[in-house]
Image (spheres, rainbow, N blue to C red):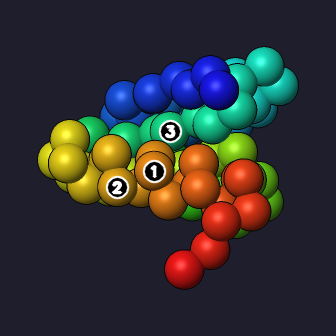
Amino acid sequence: MSHTLGLVRDEADALESSICHAASFCDNVIDMDQGSSNDSWAIVEALAAELPSKVIACERTTGALLEIALGEQCLASEGVTG
């Protein structure tokens, strides 16, 4: 599996196209908000809702929580639930 991590802060103008491009060749696109003050986070959340098997939205979080989110997403993509 291939993953990409995007640190997002006030990048609303290019964010949607960047995430969609990354989703075209990565199994998971993980976007972590870094305190955006514009619509960046709303764009990430909308894409995560639209592409739930590809885009993972993580608000400011620790590495451990990111690993949990990524692990759950990977298990779900393999059909493992619980």
Pick whichever of labels 3 and 2 is earlier in the sequence. Answer: 3
Q: Which one is closest to the eye, mark 3 or mark 2?
A: 2
Q: CA distance from mark 1 to mark 3?
A: 12 Å
Viewer-nearest residue: 68 or 7: 68
As drawn, is 7 to the left or to the right of 74?
A: left
**Looking at the rendering, in which quadrant would you find the N terminus?**
top right
Residue, far right = 24
Q: CA distance from mark 3 to mark 2?
A: 12 Å
Pick whichever of labels 1 and 3 is earlier in the sequence. Answer: 3
Q: Is residue 30 above or below residue 21?
A: below
Residue located at (47% from left, 39% from top): 31
Circle 1: residue type: Gly
Viewer-nearest residue: 35 or 62: 62
Q: Give yes or no for contact between labels 2 and 1 (Cβ–Cβ under 8 Å).
A: yes
SS at circle 3: strand
Residue 61's spot in the image, x, y percent?
21, 51
Residue located at (70% from left, 45% from top): 54
Circle 3: residue type: Ile
Circle 2: residue type: Ile
Q: Which residue is mark 2?
A: 68
Q: Which residue is mark 3?
A: 30
Residue 17's spot in the image, x, y percent?
74, 27
Q: Which residue is mark 1?
A: 71
Residue located at (62% from left, 22% from top): 2
**Looking at the rendering, in which quadrant would you find the C terminus?**
bottom right
Q: CA distance from mark 2 to mark 1?
A: 5 Å
Residue 80's spot in the image, x, y percent?
65, 65
